[in-house]
Every structure is written in C-alpha cells, then in structure tokens.
Image (cartoon, rainbow, N blue to C red):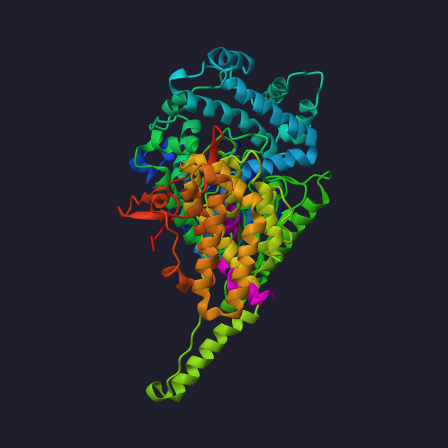
Amino acid sequence: MLGGEGSINGTGDKWVRNENETMMKWAAEFGAAAFQVEHRFYGSKEYSPLGDQTTASLKLLTIDQALADIKEFITQMNALYFKDDQPIWITFGGSYPGSLSAWFRETYPDMTAGAVSSSSAVHVSVDYYGYAINTEKTYRTVNDTCAEVIKTAFDNIVKKAYDGQNSRRQLKSKFHLCDEFDENNLSKSLQFFFQNIYGYFQGINQYTGDNRNNATRSGLGVPAACNILNNETITDPIDRVIAVMQLYDDWNPLPNGCRPNNYSSFIEYYSNTTMPDDDIISTRSWIWQTCTELGYYQTTDGGNGGIFGSTVPLDFFADQCIDLFGPEFTLDNTFKLVDAVRTKYGGADSYKGTKVCFPNGSFDPWQDLGHKASNTNNDVDSWLINGTAHCADMYPARDSDVQSLKDARARIRDHLAKWLADAQDLKTHTGSSTNVSFLLAVCIAIFKRKRACKYSATRRTVLLIKSLFTVISFGMKFAILLAALCGAALAQFGTDNCDSTPFNYCNRILGDFWRADTSTAWTDLSTLDRITQSLIISPYTISSWVNVCNGFSLFFGCLGQAKIRNCLGTVGFVGAGRSLPEAYAYQGFLAEWDFKCGAGFWTIYERKEITTCVESTYVNYQQETKAALNTYQTAVTQDPNNACTYSQNLLNAWQNIYQKGPCRSVNPAQAGWFGCQSAREWSNAQFRHCKHTTTCASPSSVEAVTRVNPQTGKTEYQALPFYHIVNNKAVVLEEAAWLSQE
C-alpha cells in the first residue's frame, strides 16, 4: 500500500488488514502478497527523514523523492522476500496516492506490470474552482431546490458578515464559533469563516454514497443534507445550513466542542515544526506540497452565479504559503512550480504511461483534474463511474452498489488479469519465476486540504508553409525531398487531427461554466458569437466581461496547447471540413477575444468610465460592426493582394463605431482605440504581415494596458489573464503570460 497525505498509524493500515477491501479481494484471488509503505513526512516523528518540519527539511518532500522511495521499497522487498525470484508488482492508489501510482508507472515502467489510479488528480492545477462547480452539480442533481437553499443561505451569511460587528457577533453565536472575528484582519478572518462552512458541503459531497466508513454507510451524504435543507419547518436558510453542519459533526465530533474561527491561530498552530502529533504533521506537510508542487486549491472563483458565491478566493490559500513557510513562497512561485510538475508528468492531456486504469466518479468533485481520454495503443483506460463519488471503486463491495460500480470493479479486475498474464508471458520467455506481489496504494481523505486552475492564455498561430525549389542551386534530389516534406505538411489541411473525445469534454466544461449550450459553437461561429453576446448583460458591469474571459481561459487550459493547435488552428478547422474562410473567421474571432480579455480588458477596467459604454457598444452595435466585417471579408477574398488596405479600413470603421456610440460623451478616444484594436486582432489573424502596416492611434490607451514585466524589467503588453471576483470587483492574477509590444 502506497501512503498518501496521512499517517498509516491506527486506521491508516486498513487497506492491507481488512480482507474485505476490494484490492485485498483481488490479492487473494491472484495469490499476491500485500505491502504497505508510508509517504515520507507523513508518519511519526521517529520515522521522519530529519525529525522536523522546518522549511529546510521540507525541501526533501517532493513528488520525485516520493517516487524514488517507492522504487527503493520495491527493490528492498525483492531482496528481502524474493531473493531468487522476480515478482510482478502492480500499484494501486486513489486521490493523491492514485496520482503517485500513475506517475510511478510513467517514471519507472520497468518496475511494475501496471497501475490503477482511482479518482486521481494528475492534472495538477493551482486555482481549482472546478471543485465548487462540480459540488454544485451534485447537489442540483439530487435536488435543485436544495441547491437554491444553499445559495440563499450563503448570500445571507455574506451579507450579515459584512453588515457590521454586531451582525458578526450574531454569526459567532449562531455558528457556535470558538473565537470572535478578528476585526484587525477582517478580510482574512471572514475568508477563514466562509471556507470552513464551504468545507462541510465539500466533505459531505466528496464521499456521498461511498462505502467508506460508518458515517457514509449510515447515509451521511448529499441526499441526507438536502432533506435538511428542504425542511421548511426550519424557516431561516442559515439555520438549515447549520443543521447540515451539525449532521456532519455528529459523525466527526469537534475537538473543542466549538468551530474554529481564527486564521492567526490556525497559522500559529501549523507553524510548529517539531512534529508533535499526526494532525500537525500531515496538515503542515500537505500545505507544503500544495504550495510547492500540487496546487489543488478549491476556490469559489468560478463566477458570481455559483451557490457558494465568491467566498473563498485564491489569495486565501496563497497567503497560507507565505504565512507558514516564508515570503519567498509567493503565488507566482506556486504557479511556476505546479506548471513544472504538469509539464514533467504530462498532466491529463499528455500522460505517457502505459497499462493504467483511471476510474473516476460522476459525483467526484475532483473529476476535472483526472485523466480523461483512453488510449488503447498504450492500454490506458479512463472512464466515469456513473452515480459514484471519490474512490468508490476502492471500498468494500456491497450488494446495494449501483451496477456501474459493480461493472467498474469487474473492468479493473479484467485489466489486472491481462497485465499479469502479459508479465507472466514475458517472464516465461526470460526464465523468471511466477511470484506475484501487489503494491496497494491508499485513498486518504483530503477533506482538510481540499484545494485548480489558473489557465494562462495560449496564443494561436497559423502555420504558413512556403516551398521554394531551386534545382540549379540545390540539386534535384534535395528538391524532391523538400517537396515530399512540404507535401506531407500541406496534406494536414485535409486531415482531421482533432481528438474529439477530450475536445468535447472541454467544450462541455465551457458550456457548464457559461451555462450555455456550446454543442454547436465550433461548427457554427454565429452560435459562439451569440453566446458571448448573451453573456454581456445589462447593467453592463465588469463581471459580465470577466465571465466570458474566464470561460475562454478555462476552455483553452483544459485543451492544452497541442489540442488547441489541432482543433482550433487553421489546419484543425480545415481538416474538420470547414472552408478556409470559415477557418480564418474562427481564428479572427478568437484573436479578437484574446485581445478583449487581455490588453482590451485593462482599457475598460482601469478606465472605469468606459466600462459600461464599451460593453453596450459591443452588444447593441453588432449590426454595424458585422456590416463592416462583411465588407472587409468580401474585399480580401476578391483582392487579397491589397488585404492590408482593407484591414485598415476595417480598423477605421470599428474605431468610428465605438467612438460615436454610447461612449461618445464619455471617453471616445479610449473607446475608439478598443474598437480599432479589436478589429486589428481579427484581421491580423489571417494576414499577419499587416500588423506592420495597420495601426490604431491612441497612445494614452496603451498606458492602461501595459505592465512592467518583473522578470525582465521591460514594459510589455499583458496577455489574456485569469480573473476572480472579490467584493464584486475583478481582480486579475498578475502571473499572466507576457507579450512583446510588437
């Protein structure tokens, strides 16, 4: 058993001592030995590498080190118990250990015959607000009215929390809090309070229906919570939420008989580096891993429409890194380190392991970070188990289990049999013995440290291939070779290289985020255009714009660079059967929104006087802008040699529309620049050489959309960032990518 983010003391060793656990059933069937190994820095002090949890010591707590520990463990067990044999090992794991199981298979493929990675989150991400979105989906699936009660209650709690000290004292009494709110650090104190309430709903949802423990077996889950939330004899929605929290506490008693409510005390408690008890050891180590490699921060940054509001922003978790480990552990540092892990192990899109099962539950809030696309060539099988939650396949089987869960266990068992047979065949050819060992990996609850995704923009590029053959200079053989290479590249224009399964998955995420039907958005540009227009709604606040931008960022981040190129590049569109003009239209539309969510966003956000009028122009002057665009497209189709002239005409037309529309009496120059630059991005997507000759004159606006890159010290345009809402204001993450001012 591979350990995760907790000790294997006490009940932690249940996975190898309980013969009813699913993996132990398989171990008995296949005649396997079962081992359990604890994750470094999560066990008792006497087993810790250095005996403390100082920052200097915790630098040895890394994924690479954990994987190397597993390799060393297998090597030593082979030497100790199987001296004359070559046993077959298969790793199991759920949640974070499930990710380790997959990463070990990928990193040390010669050490095992396969891996099961249940409910794993291999696509490590920093701002994982998808957790909140999926949690809301589960509550709405069970009972939509129940979800609306949660929303009403959270709205009322937030209002009371900001309604003055007397109201906060009432909340302290109502929620039976241990501490008064810290009026000197009110923002962080309220975030701590909101996160604790949100945490109850996370914990109830994450294991709903699982055969995990007596609590879940007795019905602690979303249906039970909704029964309370829909109880109209409790008139105040806040009191219904408190009743749900009490249901959870009945099974998980509070240590001090009250609910903690002091962020400073939390930081002080977990700043203890002497490893005095399992709670401090596991929590401090886990927060370290989230700050340095994993992220997994479960924020509510997914927009204003969620039932949990915008109560738990990214900075709540980011500040913990600095407060616990030092000023160098900034959010920028976390993004870089998490990106490095995702790049190294491939995330969900570029995973390189073979012979791996990736089962996930349809109710599991972590599912968006799991591996999604099966790959028969690599014997990688990924699927959702309908009607189940986190790690459901790992717990003891019951007659009452849903059929999809029974089928999932049978599916995993079939893979095990195949992998063992394949490994045995290989051993037979090499004269090896037939002993089999399972390395079982644990699924440990991560309720205490529920943490995805900040997505930086991907700049789309169009591949232009030009062939020049000079037979006299290079010779006929070289010319033929070059022609063959170019012909192969050009042939891509007739090939659909877009993998529809992950693309459709990401598109569903986009639709869920926007709460819109995006099923035809990538076959009919007018649908995508109509959706973005519908999201910019009166009274035209900045939040509407943020919602569109975050949707695009979420979609592009889900796809990854390779799929963006294969599915949304010119080659991808044409390969999927679109005409070249249609492909360029999509390219232009996406480039326009790339600007509107980056430099253009800063124009309307920092020049707040034009926010409303620019949004109004975008929505209400579509007829005028489309007419100018149609004129441009007709002209460049008939006379592409003068494309840059027609492009400048389009820029001038859009600038004029934005200047003379609703912004005419506010700040027409700034608004005009916004319209002009939007058109410039649209047209330059097709005719990139025109960027050197087309211009939008309004220097003062450029000041609003540039920043000094802290890494280079140069003033540069800021690219498509990712935003979250704080007190109804858009706050940008400064870690967005940087663009050349060219």
**Main SS class of the magenta portion in the image:** helix
**Total count of labels:** 0
Residue sitting at 60 percent across and 46 percent down? 531
Residue sitting at 46 percent across and 37 percent down? 665
Name the image quarter holding residue 307: top right
Q: Nearer the viewer, residue 219 or 139?
A: 139
Residue 288: x, y in percent? 38, 36
Residue 476 appears in the picture as rendered: yes
Q: Quadrant of the C terminus?
A: bottom left
Residue 333: x, y in percent? 35, 41
- What segment carries the magenta color? 554-581
Residue 245, placed above or below residue 464: above
Residue 388, placed above or below residue 258: below
Residue 665, placed above or below residue 161: below
In magenta stretch: residue 27: no
The residue at the far left in this view is: 713
Residue 507: x, y in percent? 59, 50
Residue 138: x, y in percent? 64, 36
In magenta stretch: residue 563: yes
Residue 598 appears in the picture as rendered: no
Q: Nearer the viewer, residue 597 or 608?
A: 608
Residue sitting at 60 percent across and 55 percent down? 525
Q: Nearer the viewer, residue 574 or 604?
A: 604
Q: Nearer the viewer, residue 544 or 677?
A: 677
